[in-house]
Image (cartoon, rainbow, N blue to C red):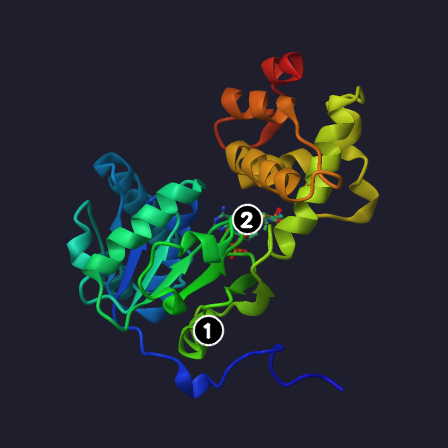
């Protein structure tokens, strides 16, 4: 017998309305989900970052993607202008005072996230829901400096956000039903499938991916050439090879995810000094101007 709703999903009627959204961070993931929020919820979205340059980049990306939607005929020109006008950027977090939903996607460093949430709590209303897009840190620990940790939930998107259908909604021991319900209903409004996961390292998807990509990296670390490992899984019909996926995820994020898993389960996950070197180098593949892979980057092959 199929369950009507995911295990532990609370009553939808508890969900709070969302009339304004705050996004903390304007990096790769934040830009993509800020666009999704404005497109699907059609409410003001305010993006903050410590760097004005990064904010400008984020807004530039969103405008560019809205232009592509216009070219594909998926939004009208009036709608495109309206969506663009709904997205603003500022380094001033006091602009979040009337946001009902604030979601964070800064770099994966626990203390930085704890501090940013403690600061945000000074600006937002009592009833605002707070969410984090962390890849593999403990959501409960991220909320350790909050006065109201019951309003914090994990809301984990996958890259590319526009295409990947899943959101992991991470419930901590403190998350209350109103918060969880708001997260589930919001995921539905974004046309995503939401699953509720426990607050464990890597949740579900990244735990499995860390195994897959970690083993691929370990095979290279122990002497099998990149190109052999990269294509070994081709017969399984995955949409990307292991190292293409690692680059898509981001080499720094990938290294962080792997380290987090190694720290939590040292007997089950490897560390990889090579992955850190690759993250510093910035790429595994050599690509053309359009992003199409030409082959392995020579330097990347040299440094492993
Ligand atoms: N942004 C927006 N849209 C994109 C996109 C991007 N970066 N990449 C692809 N798309 C869209 C295209 O515009 C196209 O849309 P359309 O059909 O409406 O015009 C559609 O996706 C298909 O694009 P393509 O035909 O160019 O691409 P493919 O069919 O080769 O698919 C892919 C591309 C969807 C990226 C596919 O290769 C894939 O699913 N790869 C695996 C991705 C994955 O596993 N992601 C999870 C990473 S883990 C993670 O993010 C968690 C983090 O915490 C680490």
Does residue 148 appear to the left or right of 136 in the view shown? left
Above/below status of 183 relative to 108: below
Q: Is residue 168 above or below residue 226?
A: below
List x then y, in percent, for residue 229: 78, 30
Helix, strand or loop status at disc 1 = helix
User: Which of the pair 124/85 is nearer the observer?
Assistant: 124
Compared with 78, 179 (above or below) is below
Question: Residue 180 — which label?
Answer: 1
- Work out whether 42 lies above or below 34: below
* Ligand 1 lies under 8 Å from the Cβ of mark 2: yes
Q: Residue at the location (75% across, 41% down)?
A: 268
Instruction: Give left or right: position of 163 versus 208.
Output: left
* Relative image position of residue 241 (x, y in whole percent): 70, 38
Q: Is residue 17 visible?
A: yes
Q: Residue at x 41, y 51 (%)?
A: 32
Please state the horizontal and vertical placement of residue 148, each as a whole percent of the image: 33, 66
Quadrant of residue 130 within the rendered picture: bottom left
Q: In front here: 97 or 87?
A: 97
Residue 226 location, quadrant: top right
Residue drawn at (75%, 24%) of the image: 220
Q: Is residue 106 visible?
A: no
Q: Residues within 10 Å of mark 1 (few under 14, many from 20)?
A: many
User: How far is mark 1 from mark 2, CA to CA?
Assistant: 19 Å
Is residue 94 found left or right of 231 in the rendered image? left
* Residue for badge 2: 136
The quarter of the displayed image where residue 153 is located: bottom left
């Amino acid at each position: 017998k199929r369950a009507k709703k995911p295990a532990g999903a609370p009553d939808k009627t508890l969900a709070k309305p969302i009339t304004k959204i705050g996004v903390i961070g304007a990096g790769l993931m934040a830009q993509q989900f800020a666009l999704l929020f404005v497109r699907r919820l059609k409410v003001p979205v305010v993006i903050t970052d410590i760097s004005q340059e990064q904010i400008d980049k984020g807004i530039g990306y969103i405008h560019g993607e809205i232009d592509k939607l216009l070219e594909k005929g998926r939004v009208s020109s009036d709608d495109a202008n309206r969506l663009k006008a709904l997205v603003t950027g500022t380094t001033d977090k006091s602009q979040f005072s009337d946001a009902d939903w604030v979601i964070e996607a800064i770099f994966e460093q626990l203390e930085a996230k704890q501090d940013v949430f403690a600061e945000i709590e000074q600006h937002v209303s009592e009833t605002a829901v707070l969410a984090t897009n962390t890849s593999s840190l403990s959501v409960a620990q991220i909320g350790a400096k909050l006065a109201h940790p019951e309003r914090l939930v994990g809301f984990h998107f996958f890259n590319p956000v526009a295409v990947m259908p899943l959101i992991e909604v991470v419930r901590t021991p403190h998350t209350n039903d109103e918060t969880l319900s708001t997260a589930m209903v919001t995921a539905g409004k974004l046309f995503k499938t939401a699953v509720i996961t426990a607050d464990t390292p890597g949740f579900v998807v990244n735990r499995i991916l860390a195994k897959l990509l970690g083993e691929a990296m370990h095979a290279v670390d122990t002497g099998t050439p990149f190109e052999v490992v990269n294509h070994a899984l081709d017969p399984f019909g995955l949409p990307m090879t292991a190292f293409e996926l690692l680059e898509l995820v981001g080499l720094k994020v990938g290294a962080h995810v792997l380290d987090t898993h190694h720290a939590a389960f040292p007997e089950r996950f490897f560390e990889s000094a090579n992955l850190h070197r690759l993250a510093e180098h910035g790429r595994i593949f050599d690509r053309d101007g359009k992003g199409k892979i030409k082959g392995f980057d020579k330097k990347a092959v040299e440094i492993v």
